[in-house]
Image (spheres, rainbow, N blue to C red):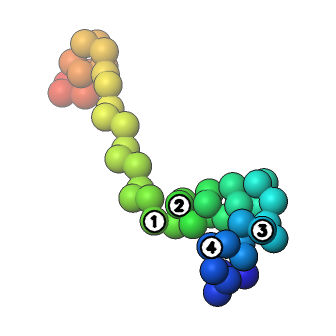
């Protein structure tokens, strides 16, 4: 169905199917998320350096 014109897609696909395609194609082009920074307590930092 990706070779269809925008008008043909709008007339033949339902909203849920369009949302599924938008989600799948959007996930493919989205950059990977950055990892969360490591947060240590003061005691953990002291323990890491000991």
Residue that numbered label 1 is attached to: 29
Query: Which of the two discs, 3 and 1, labels the residue nearer the N terminus?
Result: 3
Which marked residue is nearer to the observer: mark 2 or mark 3?
3
The tag on residue 26 is 2
* SS at circle 2: helix
The tag on residue 45 is none
Spatial CA distance of label 4 from label 3 is 9 Å
Q: Position of residue 37 (x, y in %)?
A: 31, 34
Spatial CA distance of label 2 from label 4 is 17 Å
Q: Position of residue 45 (x, y in %)?
A: 24, 21
| Residue, far top | 42
Residue that numbered label 3 is attached to: 11
Query: Which of the two discs, 2 and 4, labels the residue nearer the N terminus?
Result: 4
Residue at 67% from the left image edge and 83% from the top image edge: 4
Position of the C terminus, as image quadrant, is: top left
Query: Which of the two discs, 4 and 1, labels the residue nearer the N terminus?
Result: 4
Left/right placement of residue 34 relative to residue 27 reads left
Which marked residue is nearer to the observer: mark 4 or mark 1?
4
Query: Which of the two discs, 2 and 3, labels the residue nearer the N terminus?
Result: 3
* SS at circle 1: helix
Left/right placement of residue 45 relative to residue 38 reads left
Marks 2 and 3: CB-CB under 8 Å? no
* Residue 27 drawn above or below residue 36: below
């Amino acid at each position: 169905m990706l070779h269809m014109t925008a008008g043909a897609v709008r007339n033949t696909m339902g909203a849920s199917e369009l949302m599924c395609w938008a989600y799948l194609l959007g996930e493919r082009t989205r950059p990977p998320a950055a990892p969360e920074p490591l947060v240590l307590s003061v005691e953990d930092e002291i323990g890491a350096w000991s």
